[in-house]
Amino acid sequence: MSAYTIYHNPRCSKSRQTLQLLQDRGVEPEVVLYLETPPSANELAGLLDKLGMTARQLLRKGEEEYKLRGLSDQSLDDEALIQAMCEAPKLIERPIVICGDRAVLGRPPENVLDLLGA
């Protein structure tokens, strides 16, 4: 079985539910507390690749930081948005679960079932 990794925020209910769903199915993922150890720009670009998403799709638009940084500006490219997420990791939508070259956003938590082959 491939190793699983979860980008986790223990204060987020969806993140906790996703982790619990994995554990209930016998998966003990590597837990990355991304608010404490944010991904680098390269890691984030790789995550977006695995998710099949753009940087804008991964942004938490309800965060105060989003407004303060003017991230709704459509002229900002992925590189600028990735940099903002690296500097302020709470802007990253969560949780993200990775297995091999695939990743899913655990919103809703049941999305991870695709990775588990369930």
Image (spheres, grey):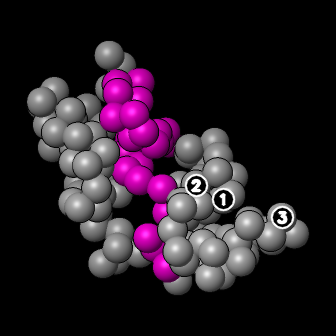
Mark 2 vs mark 1, CA separation in Å: 5 Å
Identify which amino acid the numbered label 3 is placed on.
Answer: Gln
Q: Is mark 1 on a helix, strand or loop?
A: helix
Identify which amino acid the numbered label 2 is placed on.
Answer: Leu
Range drawn in magenta: 88-114
> In the image shown, does 2 or 60 lie closer to the viewer?
60
Residue 107 lies in quadrant: top left
Q: In which quarter of the image is the C terminus?
A: top left
Which mark, residue 58? 2
The residue to which callout 3 is attached is 74
> In the image shown, does 105 or 40 lie closer to the viewer?
105
Q: Position of residue 102 (x, y in %)?
A: 49, 39
Q: Residues within 10 Å of mark 2 (few under 14, many from 20)?
A: many
Eye-nearest disc, 2 or 3: 3
Q: Residues within 10 Å of mark 3 (few under 14, many from 20)?
A: few
The residue to which callout 1 is attached is 55
> Counting residues from the N terminus, which is met first, the one under dot 3 or under dot 1?
1
Name the outermost residue toward the top.
Answer: 118
Q: Could you tell me which residue is drawn at 48 percent across and 56 percent down?
A: 93
CB of mark 2 within 8 Å of CB of mark 1? yes
Q: Quadrant of the N terminus?
A: top left
Name the outermost residue toward the right.
Answer: 75
Mark 3 vs mark 1, CA separation in Å: 12 Å
